[in-house]
Image (cartoon, rainbow, N blue to C red):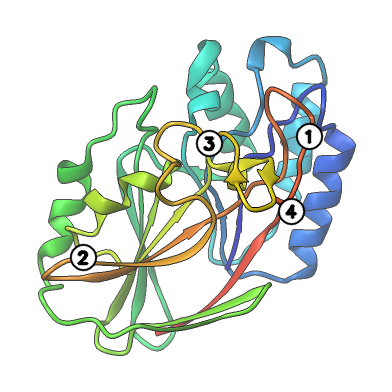
Amino acid sequence: MVQFSDTHVGPHFSLAQLKEVVTLINEQKPDLIMFTGDLLDRVRSFKESKDELIAILAELNAPLGKFAVYGNHDRGGGGSEYYQQVMEQANFDLLVNDVRTISLANKKSITIAGLDDFLLGKPKVEETLEPLQEGNQLTRRKEQNQSNQLNNVTSPHSDTFVICLVHEPDVADRIVNYPVDLQLSGHSHGGQVQVPLLGSVVTPSLARKYREGLYEIHNENNTMKLYVNRGIGTTRLPIRLGSTPEISIFTLKI
């Protein structure tokens, strides 16, 4: 499974660069592709071809599906409908407080929940995730080994592995209250600029507690992994320091 996020296509990240990202993702031969929001930096200032943007994203190939959620930049500036059209025409399943289940050959399944953006959208956490409680009231044991490129996530005590896509990572403290195994988020850019000894200079709202990489979050009923992708593009200023752009690659063992 590949996650990519926060491309912020616009003046500082071109369609040619996006095409390079698409090529890199396809080289991984993923079964699933997840996009966790902020496709364009500002829809009103996007001057390149909408059709070309769709064509590039449509080249992404994943036999079990391509899924996406809204980010705040996708919702902002009147971009909601534009983003919806682009993602759907590029054959992404755009999840707005929706749940999908993928049946696997071993009679187990992957459940993917997608929440609307928390800053500018209308996320419905309880309505979307509460129904997942049925049939999932059991203890999950998850083991994860992380390297720079590979995360192995194992959930041997459940017939379904539940992934929640949501742009802003700090909402994980709410998501852990539901039977979710793995939350995938972006939004933070890993701080975008990290000063040695001081860390991130500025992080956006709802990305200040969980800024980058892998976390394990606990409550009395659940243990959930959170992975915060640093994103690919930049916003405000075309500068990255100490926060390398990334795609995230996961191997799920169910």
Mark 4: amino acid: Thr
Residue corresponding to mark 2: 179
Picture disc at residue 239: 1
Residue corresponding to mark 3: 203
Mark 3: amino acid: Thr
Residue 195 placement (x, y as % from top left): 68, 45
Towards the viewer: 26 or 74 = 74
Towards the viewer: 207 or 182 = 207
Q: Residue at x 48, y 27 (%)?
A: 72
Residue corresponding to mark 4: 244
Q: Which label's residue is closer to the chain start, 2 or 1?
A: 2
Mark 1: amino acid: Ile
Of the two numbered discs 4 and 3 in the rendering, the one whose residue sits closer to the viewer: 3
Q: Secondary structure at mark 4?
A: loop
Of the two numbered discs 4 and 2 in the rendering, the one whose residue sits closer to the viewer: 4
Figure check: 233 above or below 210: above
Dividing the picture into quarters, in which one does residue 55 lie? Answer: top right
Q: Which label's residue is closer to the chain start, 4 or 1?
A: 1
Q: Residues within 10 Å of mark 1 (few under 14, many from 20)?
A: few
Q: Secondary structure at mark 2?
A: loop
Disc 4 to disc 1, how far (Cα)?
A: 11 Å
Q: Is residue 55 left or right of residue 189?
A: right
Tag 2–tag 3 contact (CB < 8 Å): no
